Image (cartoon, helix red, strand yellow):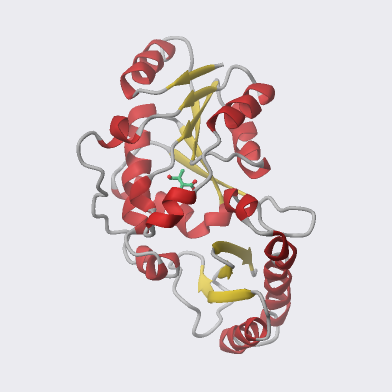
Amino acid sequence: MTVFTTKSEIQNYISALKNDIKTIGFVPTMGALHNGHMSLVKKAIQNNDKAIVSIFVNPTQFDNDKDLEKYPRTLDKDVSLLKVLNPNIIVYAPSVKDIYEDETKAKEFSFDGLEFEMEGEFRTGHFNGVGTIVKRLFEIITPNTAYFGEKDFQQLQIIRKLVTKYQIPVKIIGCKIHRESNGLAMSSRNERLKPEYREAAPFIYKILKLAKEKFGTKSATKVVEWVEKQFEKHKLLKLEYFSIADTETLKPVKRKSNKKNYRAFIAVYAGDIRLIDNIALN
Ligand code: PAF
């Protein structure tokens, strides 16, 4: 199992590799790997000659220093998990300096408005940080295909926009959300949940499923009001936003059209841990 920590090493390795192989499948991660990540890595292995996983907690996408500081960093464990899955996976685990050199700063992007909705509204600058790191990683790894989870559906749409706008020749594959048996969407943040919040958190998916059911017969406004009420009554979970949005524009639905696809998106605080989730509505 090879772990590279500098871009020059991995770039040398990749340019030599390209003489022998046709396709690289890439899974960018911030580590603390769980089964959701593993399913992306499995896809990268199955559908490519080589799978590369990056593990890098990207400082410029955090709008909160405490959150960045507390983000789990479990490199040895992550590498062991990947090794068990397949010892031929290549890991790129750079330092902040290797990626950002002398200026740990995000570039400014326009994602045609996608960046202002939901996560963009509540996490200032988040998508500039994501755009900066994903573009940088694509330049270093030069993958043919990259795999992203639908749990961060807004991020997935923004990365699709990034490759289109910058004509980056990487195919983006969105992969289904992996859930724990109680319905909680898998996330690296789940391991930081205190027991009472861990027990309460499956409520989020329960409400998403009920909201989906209600959306069949009720307007988006009515469903949003209903969801907000359910969280007002909840003792532990604090709703940050719930939005029913068009999957392409991510703008909230005003009037339903059967020509469009919709998703419900949610962000909830479970104590000081922020959890997000979403569900396809049609
Ligand atoms: O989804 C994540 O884990 C991160 O946002 C990503 C895409 C690895 C960029 O840091």
Q: Quadrant of residue 201?
A: bottom right
Give the image location of residue 220, x and y in percent. 58, 84
| Above or below 51: residue 129 | below
| Above or below 274: residue 137 | above
| Above or below 171: residue 263 | below
Q: Is residue 164 visible?
A: no
Numbered circles on residues, count: 0
* x 59%, y 67%: residue: 271
Return the residue found at the far left.
Answer: 102
- State which quarter of the image contains the N terminus: top right
Give the image location of residue 80, x and y in percent. 63, 25
Give the image location of residue 272, x and y in percent. 54, 64
Q: Foreground residue, 161 or 189? A: 189
Q: Is residue 81 visible?
A: yes
Q: Quadrant of residue 232?
A: bottom right
Left or right position of 121 against 150: left
* x 68%, y 41%: residue: 35
Give the image location of residue 139, x and y in percent. 32, 32
Left or right position of 135 against 79: left
Q: Quadrant of residue 169?
A: top left
- State which quarter of the image contains the C terminus: bottom right
Left or right position of 107 against 280: left
Q: Foreground residue, 259 or 104? A: 104
* x 66%, y 87%: residue: 218
